[in-house]
Amino acid sequence: MAEALLPSARINLERATVLVLDDNGPSLDILSQVVSGFGVKQLYRAETVADAQSLIRTKTFDLIVSDVQMPVTDGIEFIEWLRRDGGETNRYIPVILLTGHTRTSQIFKLRDAGSNYVVAKPLTPKVLLERIFWVAREERAFIECDSFIGPDRRFKHEGPPPGTDGRRKDDLPAEVGDAQTPNMSDDEIANLMRPAKVQI
Amino acid sequence: MTVRKFRPPNRLSALIRDKGGILAKDAVAAAEAGVETLREASMAALDEALSEIESRFGKGAPDRNGESFEALYLLASKVIDVSMFVTEAGIDKAAMSLCGLADSCGTAGAWRWDAVDVHLNALKLLRAMGAQLPVEQRDAMLLGLYQVSHYRPEEG
Protein backbone atom coordinates (compact mmCIF):
# COMPACT_ATOMS: atom_id res chain seq x y z
CA MET A 1 0.00 0.00 0.00
CA ALA A 2 1.45 3.37 -1.00
CA GLU A 3 2.22 5.88 1.71
CA ALA A 4 -0.57 8.43 2.24
CA LEU A 5 0.16 12.06 1.48
CA LEU A 6 -0.58 14.03 4.62
CA PRO A 7 -1.84 17.63 4.23
CA SER A 8 1.08 18.70 6.43
CA ALA A 9 3.66 16.95 4.23
CA ARG A 10 6.10 19.29 2.52
CA ILE A 11 6.76 18.86 -1.19
CA ASN A 12 9.12 20.72 -3.44
CA LEU A 13 8.53 20.59 -7.18
CA GLU A 14 10.12 23.95 -7.99
CA ARG A 15 13.08 22.42 -9.77
CA ALA A 16 11.16 19.58 -11.41
CA THR A 17 10.78 19.66 -15.18
CA VAL A 18 7.37 18.34 -16.13
CA LEU A 19 5.76 17.57 -19.48
CA VAL A 20 1.96 17.61 -19.75
CA LEU A 21 0.29 16.19 -22.84
CA ASP A 22 -3.36 16.37 -23.86
CA ASP A 23 -4.89 16.92 -27.29
CA ASN A 24 -7.92 18.70 -25.85
CA GLY A 25 -6.96 22.36 -25.26
CA PRO A 26 -9.35 23.09 -22.35
CA SER A 27 -8.32 19.84 -20.68
CA LEU A 28 -4.63 20.71 -21.13
CA ASP A 29 -5.32 24.11 -19.57
CA ILE A 30 -6.84 22.43 -16.50
CA LEU A 31 -3.93 20.01 -16.21
CA SER A 32 -1.38 22.82 -16.59
CA GLN A 33 -3.09 24.92 -13.93
CA VAL A 34 -3.12 21.99 -11.52
CA VAL A 35 0.55 21.14 -12.04
CA SER A 36 1.58 24.83 -11.81
CA GLY A 37 -0.37 25.09 -8.57
CA PHE A 38 1.83 22.33 -7.16
CA GLY A 39 4.79 24.68 -7.54
CA VAL A 40 6.24 23.39 -10.82
CA LYS A 41 8.11 26.21 -12.58
CA GLN A 42 9.42 24.36 -15.62
CA LEU A 43 6.26 23.13 -17.25
CA TYR A 44 6.15 22.10 -20.90
CA ARG A 45 2.84 21.63 -22.73
CA ALA A 46 2.20 19.44 -25.75
CA GLU A 47 -1.07 19.03 -27.64
CA THR A 48 0.09 16.16 -29.83
CA VAL A 49 2.29 13.14 -29.35
CA ALA A 50 4.54 14.47 -32.13
CA ASP A 51 5.10 17.70 -30.15
CA ALA A 52 5.79 15.68 -27.00
CA GLN A 53 8.31 13.52 -28.85
CA SER A 54 10.14 16.61 -30.12
CA LEU A 55 10.40 17.96 -26.57
CA ILE A 56 11.61 14.64 -25.21
CA ARG A 57 14.38 14.55 -27.81
CA THR A 58 15.72 17.93 -26.67
CA LYS A 59 15.00 18.22 -22.93
CA THR A 60 15.37 16.17 -19.79
CA PHE A 61 12.16 15.64 -17.86
CA ASP A 62 11.47 14.44 -14.33
CA LEU A 63 7.79 13.56 -14.79
CA ILE A 64 5.27 13.16 -17.59
CA VAL A 65 1.51 13.47 -17.14
CA SER A 66 -0.36 12.44 -20.26
CA ASP A 67 -3.87 11.93 -21.51
CA VAL A 68 -4.68 8.53 -23.05
CA GLN A 69 -7.50 9.14 -25.54
CA MET A 70 -5.96 11.12 -28.39
CA PRO A 71 -6.51 10.90 -32.14
CA VAL A 72 -3.74 9.73 -34.52
CA THR A 73 -1.32 8.52 -31.81
CA ASP A 74 -2.74 7.78 -28.37
CA GLY A 75 -1.17 7.78 -24.92
CA ILE A 76 -0.48 4.05 -25.01
CA GLU A 77 1.61 4.26 -28.17
CA PHE A 78 3.35 7.33 -26.76
CA ILE A 79 4.45 5.54 -23.59
CA GLU A 80 5.58 2.49 -25.54
CA TRP A 81 7.68 4.79 -27.75
CA LEU A 82 9.07 6.64 -24.71
CA ARG A 83 10.15 3.44 -22.96
CA ARG A 84 11.90 2.10 -26.08
CA ASP A 85 13.15 5.16 -27.95
CA GLY A 86 12.87 8.07 -25.55
CA GLY A 87 16.63 8.34 -24.99
CA GLU A 88 18.59 7.34 -21.90
CA THR A 89 17.74 10.50 -19.92
CA ASN A 90 13.98 10.23 -20.34
CA ARG A 91 12.95 6.64 -21.01
CA TYR A 92 12.79 5.58 -17.34
CA ILE A 93 11.07 8.63 -15.89
CA PRO A 94 7.75 8.32 -14.07
CA VAL A 95 4.66 8.56 -16.26
CA ILE A 96 1.15 9.16 -14.96
CA LEU A 97 -1.64 8.56 -17.46
CA LEU A 98 -5.04 10.25 -17.27
CA THR A 99 -8.13 8.61 -18.67
CA GLY A 100 -11.87 9.05 -18.51
CA HIS A 101 -12.41 5.42 -19.44
CA THR A 102 -11.21 3.24 -16.60
CA ARG A 103 -12.53 -0.21 -17.45
CA THR A 104 -10.36 -2.95 -15.95
CA SER A 105 -9.21 -4.20 -19.36
CA GLN A 106 -8.22 -0.65 -20.28
CA ILE A 107 -6.24 -0.21 -17.07
CA PHE A 108 -4.31 -3.42 -17.80
CA LYS A 109 -3.43 -2.02 -21.25
CA LEU A 110 -2.15 1.20 -19.70
CA ARG A 111 -0.12 -0.70 -17.13
CA ASP A 112 1.30 -2.99 -19.81
CA ALA A 113 2.34 0.01 -21.90
CA GLY A 114 4.78 0.95 -19.10
CA SER A 115 2.98 3.65 -17.13
CA ASN A 116 3.60 4.09 -13.41
CA TYR A 117 0.07 5.10 -12.46
CA VAL A 118 -3.29 5.78 -14.01
CA VAL A 119 -5.55 8.55 -12.74
CA ALA A 120 -9.24 8.71 -13.62
CA LYS A 121 -10.73 11.86 -15.10
CA PRO A 122 -12.30 14.22 -14.24
CA LEU A 123 -9.09 15.32 -12.63
CA THR A 124 -8.93 16.44 -9.01
CA PRO A 125 -5.80 18.20 -7.70
CA LYS A 126 -5.71 16.15 -4.50
CA VAL A 127 -5.64 12.80 -6.32
CA LEU A 128 -3.03 13.92 -8.85
CA LEU A 129 -0.72 15.32 -6.16
CA GLU A 130 -1.03 12.09 -4.20
CA ARG A 131 -0.07 10.03 -7.26
CA ILE A 132 2.89 12.32 -7.99
CA PHE A 133 3.98 11.83 -4.40
CA TRP A 134 3.64 8.06 -4.81
CA VAL A 135 5.70 7.86 -8.00
CA ALA A 136 8.36 10.05 -6.38
CA ARG A 137 8.55 7.78 -3.35
CA GLU A 138 8.06 4.35 -4.87
CA GLU A 139 10.99 2.01 -5.15
CA ARG A 140 9.68 -0.30 -7.84
CA ALA A 141 12.29 -1.91 -10.03
CA PHE A 142 12.24 -1.44 -13.80
CA ILE A 143 11.84 -4.40 -16.11
CA GLU A 144 13.23 -4.45 -19.61
CA CYS A 145 12.64 -7.37 -21.95
CA ASP A 146 11.46 -8.01 -25.51
CA SER A 147 7.78 -7.63 -24.70
CA PHE A 148 7.78 -5.01 -21.94
CA ILE A 149 9.69 -2.00 -20.65
CA GLY A 150 8.37 -0.29 -17.56
CA PRO A 151 7.93 -0.42 -13.81
CA ASP A 152 7.72 -3.96 -12.43
CA ARG A 153 4.08 -5.01 -12.72
CA ARG A 154 4.42 -7.76 -10.14
CA PHE A 155 4.70 -5.67 -7.01
CA LYS A 156 1.66 -7.00 -5.16
CA HIS A 157 3.04 -10.50 -4.48
CA GLU A 158 -0.06 -12.28 -5.67
CA GLY A 159 1.98 -15.33 -6.62
CA PRO A 160 2.57 -16.78 -10.08
CA PRO A 161 -0.27 -16.74 -12.63
CA PRO A 162 -2.84 -19.53 -12.08
CA GLY A 163 -1.83 -22.84 -13.65
CA THR A 164 1.88 -22.00 -13.77
CA ASP A 165 4.77 -22.72 -11.42
CA GLY A 166 6.20 -19.24 -11.80
CA ARG A 167 9.60 -18.23 -13.13
CA ARG A 168 11.20 -16.77 -10.05
CA LYS A 169 13.24 -18.84 -7.61
CA ASP A 170 11.15 -17.57 -4.70
CA ASP A 171 7.75 -18.10 -6.36
CA LEU A 172 5.56 -20.17 -4.05
CA PRO A 173 3.00 -22.58 -5.51
CA ALA A 174 -0.61 -21.39 -5.51
CA GLU A 175 -1.65 -24.64 -3.74
CA VAL A 176 -1.08 -24.33 -0.01
CA GLY A 177 -1.25 -28.08 0.66
CA ASP A 178 -2.57 -30.00 3.67
CA ALA A 179 -2.22 -28.64 7.18
CA GLN A 180 0.70 -30.15 9.08
CA THR A 181 -0.69 -29.47 12.57
CA PRO A 182 -4.27 -29.37 13.89
CA ASN A 183 -6.17 -26.09 13.71
CA MET A 184 -5.97 -24.02 16.86
CA SER A 185 -9.11 -23.75 18.96
CA ASP A 186 -10.63 -20.36 19.78
CA ASP A 187 -9.29 -20.68 23.34
CA GLU A 188 -5.78 -21.37 22.12
CA ILE A 189 -5.98 -18.39 19.77
CA ALA A 190 -7.36 -16.21 22.58
CA ASN A 191 -4.56 -17.32 24.91
CA LEU A 192 -2.07 -16.41 22.27
CA MET A 193 -3.53 -13.01 21.47
CA ARG A 194 -5.18 -11.75 24.67
CA PRO A 195 -3.08 -9.27 26.62
CA ALA A 196 -2.85 -10.37 30.26
CA LYS A 197 -1.96 -8.39 33.34
CA VAL A 198 1.09 -9.76 35.11
CA GLN A 199 2.47 -9.22 38.61
CA ILE A 200 6.19 -8.66 38.85
CA MET B 1 14.40 -14.08 -23.65
CA THR B 2 16.68 -11.77 -21.67
CA VAL B 3 15.05 -9.92 -18.80
CA ARG B 4 16.87 -7.01 -17.20
CA LYS B 5 15.68 -5.91 -13.76
CA PHE B 6 17.21 -2.73 -12.38
CA ARG B 7 16.51 0.46 -10.48
CA PRO B 8 17.04 3.57 -12.59
CA PRO B 9 17.66 6.79 -10.63
CA ASN B 10 14.42 8.57 -9.79
CA ARG B 11 15.26 12.28 -10.11
CA LEU B 12 11.78 13.27 -8.99
CA SER B 13 12.36 11.48 -5.71
CA ALA B 14 15.39 13.65 -4.90
CA LEU B 15 13.77 16.89 -6.07
CA ILE B 16 10.53 16.50 -4.13
CA ARG B 17 12.49 16.17 -0.86
CA ASP B 18 14.55 19.33 -1.43
CA LYS B 19 14.50 21.94 1.31
CA GLY B 20 11.82 24.61 0.98
CA GLY B 21 8.74 23.79 -1.02
CA ILE B 22 5.15 24.05 0.14
CA LEU B 23 2.72 22.08 2.28
CA ALA B 24 0.64 19.52 0.37
CA LYS B 25 -2.59 21.20 1.52
CA ASP B 26 -1.34 24.56 0.18
CA ALA B 27 -0.34 22.95 -3.13
CA VAL B 28 -3.84 21.47 -3.51
CA ALA B 29 -5.46 24.79 -2.57
CA ALA B 30 -3.29 26.68 -5.10
CA ALA B 31 -4.15 24.15 -7.80
CA GLU B 32 -7.87 24.39 -7.03
CA ALA B 33 -7.73 28.18 -7.12
CA GLY B 34 -5.94 28.06 -10.46
CA VAL B 35 -8.49 25.67 -11.91
CA GLU B 36 -11.35 27.83 -10.71
CA THR B 37 -10.20 30.56 -13.12
CA LEU B 38 -10.97 28.11 -15.94
CA ARG B 39 -14.55 27.42 -14.91
CA GLU B 40 -16.16 29.58 -17.59
CA ALA B 41 -13.92 28.33 -20.40
CA SER B 42 -14.43 24.72 -19.27
CA MET B 43 -18.21 25.09 -19.25
CA ALA B 44 -18.06 26.57 -22.75
CA ALA B 45 -15.92 23.62 -23.91
CA LEU B 46 -18.35 21.19 -22.28
CA ASP B 47 -21.33 22.74 -24.06
CA GLU B 48 -19.43 22.75 -27.34
CA ALA B 49 -18.65 19.03 -27.01
CA LEU B 50 -22.27 18.22 -26.08
CA SER B 51 -23.51 20.26 -29.01
CA GLU B 52 -21.17 18.48 -31.43
CA ILE B 53 -22.30 15.09 -30.11
CA GLU B 54 -25.93 16.11 -30.69
CA SER B 55 -25.32 17.46 -34.19
CA ARG B 56 -23.33 14.42 -35.33
CA PHE B 57 -24.95 11.59 -33.34
CA GLY B 58 -28.39 12.91 -32.34
CA LYS B 59 -31.66 11.58 -33.73
CA GLY B 60 -31.83 14.37 -36.32
CA ALA B 61 -28.25 13.95 -37.58
CA PRO B 62 -28.54 13.01 -41.26
CA ASP B 63 -25.21 11.16 -41.54
CA ARG B 64 -24.92 9.51 -38.16
CA ASN B 65 -24.77 6.02 -39.64
CA GLY B 66 -21.60 7.02 -41.42
CA GLU B 67 -19.88 8.27 -38.26
CA SER B 68 -17.13 6.25 -36.59
CA PHE B 69 -17.42 4.69 -33.15
CA GLU B 70 -14.13 6.30 -32.20
CA ALA B 71 -15.46 9.79 -33.01
CA LEU B 72 -18.25 9.39 -30.45
CA TYR B 73 -15.79 7.87 -27.97
CA LEU B 74 -13.44 10.85 -28.31
CA LEU B 75 -16.25 13.39 -28.02
CA ALA B 76 -17.59 11.70 -24.88
CA SER B 77 -14.01 11.74 -23.53
CA LYS B 78 -13.91 15.49 -24.19
CA VAL B 79 -16.99 15.91 -22.02
CA ILE B 80 -15.32 13.95 -19.20
CA ASP B 81 -12.12 16.03 -19.61
CA VAL B 82 -13.86 19.26 -18.56
CA SER B 83 -16.59 17.87 -16.31
CA MET B 84 -14.86 18.60 -13.00
CA PHE B 85 -17.20 21.56 -12.45
CA VAL B 86 -20.38 19.54 -13.03
CA THR B 87 -19.76 16.34 -11.10
CA GLU B 88 -22.69 17.16 -8.79
CA ALA B 89 -24.94 17.07 -11.87
CA GLY B 90 -23.79 13.56 -12.85
CA ILE B 91 -22.64 14.67 -16.32
CA ASP B 92 -19.23 13.04 -15.90
CA LYS B 93 -20.83 9.69 -15.08
CA ALA B 94 -23.29 9.87 -17.98
CA ALA B 95 -20.38 10.68 -20.33
CA MET B 96 -18.40 7.73 -18.94
CA SER B 97 -21.37 5.51 -19.70
CA LEU B 98 -21.50 6.94 -23.23
CA CYS B 99 -17.79 6.20 -23.62
CA GLY B 100 -18.45 2.62 -22.57
CA LEU B 101 -21.36 2.42 -25.03
CA ALA B 102 -19.24 3.73 -27.93
CA ASP B 103 -16.54 1.24 -27.00
CA SER B 104 -18.94 -1.71 -26.90
CA CYS B 105 -20.60 -0.65 -30.19
CA GLY B 106 -17.12 -0.51 -31.71
CA THR B 107 -16.33 -4.00 -30.45
CA ALA B 108 -19.64 -5.32 -31.84
CA GLY B 109 -19.21 -3.34 -35.07
CA ALA B 110 -22.81 -2.07 -34.94
CA TRP B 111 -24.55 1.00 -33.61
CA ARG B 112 -27.23 0.76 -30.94
CA TRP B 113 -28.99 4.01 -31.72
CA ASP B 114 -31.70 3.58 -29.11
CA ALA B 115 -29.01 3.43 -26.43
CA VAL B 116 -27.16 6.43 -27.90
CA ASP B 117 -30.43 8.43 -27.97
CA VAL B 118 -31.15 7.62 -24.33
CA HIS B 119 -27.68 8.85 -23.34
CA LEU B 120 -27.99 12.06 -25.34
CA ASN B 121 -31.38 12.82 -23.79
CA ALA B 122 -30.00 12.12 -20.32
CA LEU B 123 -27.00 14.38 -20.92
CA LYS B 124 -29.32 17.20 -22.01
CA LEU B 125 -31.45 16.79 -18.90
CA LEU B 126 -28.44 16.56 -16.57
CA ARG B 127 -26.87 19.64 -18.13
CA ALA B 128 -30.10 21.59 -17.72
CA MET B 129 -31.02 20.53 -14.19
CA GLY B 130 -28.83 17.63 -13.00
CA ALA B 131 -27.68 19.41 -9.87
CA GLN B 132 -31.28 20.25 -8.89
CA LEU B 133 -32.60 16.70 -9.29
CA PRO B 134 -33.16 14.69 -6.11
CA VAL B 135 -30.13 12.42 -5.59
CA GLU B 136 -32.20 9.22 -5.82
CA GLN B 137 -33.73 10.33 -9.10
CA ARG B 138 -30.35 11.23 -10.58
CA ASP B 139 -28.77 7.99 -9.39
CA ALA B 140 -31.68 5.99 -10.82
CA MET B 141 -31.19 7.72 -14.17
CA LEU B 142 -27.46 6.94 -14.18
CA LEU B 143 -28.15 3.34 -13.20
CA GLY B 144 -30.51 3.10 -16.16
CA LEU B 145 -27.78 4.42 -18.45
CA TYR B 146 -25.26 1.90 -17.10
CA GLN B 147 -27.72 -0.91 -17.81
CA VAL B 148 -28.25 0.30 -21.35
CA SER B 149 -24.52 0.72 -22.06
CA HIS B 150 -23.36 -2.30 -20.00
CA TYR B 151 -20.97 0.11 -18.27
CA ARG B 152 -19.90 -1.08 -14.85
CA PRO B 153 -18.93 1.87 -12.64
CA GLU B 154 -17.50 -0.46 -9.99
CA GLU B 155 -14.76 -1.31 -12.49
CA GLY B 156 -13.66 2.25 -12.83
Image (cartoon, rainbow, N blue to C red):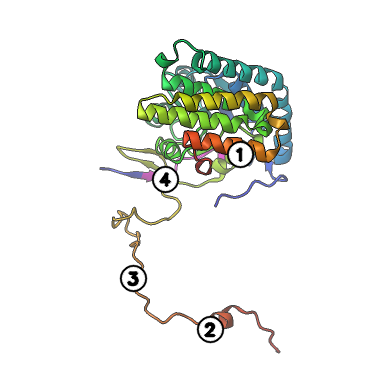
First in residue order: circle 3 vs circle 2: 3
> Of the residues shown, which amino acid type is indicated by label 4?
Arg
Residue A163: assigned label:
none
Camera sees residue B9:
yes
For the point 43% across and 31% down, which residue is it? A91
Q: Dot 3, how many residues are within 10 Å of its Cα: few (below 14), some (14-19), or many (20+)?
A: few
Pick the front one: A67 or A52 = A67
Q: Chain of mark 3?
A: A
Are discs 4 and 3 both within one chain? yes
Q: How many angstroms separate mark 1 from mark 4 (CA)?
A: 37 Å
What residue is disc 3 on? A177
**Figure quadrant of residue B89:** top right
First in residue order: circle 4 vs circle 2: 4
Q: Dot 1, how many residues are within 10 Å of its Cα: few (below 14), some (14-19), or many (20+)?
A: few
Q: Assign a secondary structure to mark 4.
A: loop
Q: Is residue A178 left or right of residue A51?
A: left
Residues in magenta? B5-14
Q: Chain of mark 1?
A: B
Q: How many angstroms separate mark 1 from mark 2 (CA)?
A: 50 Å
What residue is disc 1 on? B140
What residue is disc 2 on? A188
What residue is disc 4 on? A153
Figure disc tally: 4
Circle nearer the viewer, 1 or 2: 1
Q: Is residue A24 left or right of residue A155?
A: right
Dots 1 and 2: beta carbons under 8 Å? no
Q: Assign a secondary structure to mark 1.
A: helix
Q: How many angstroms separate mark 3 from mark 2 (CA)?
A: 23 Å
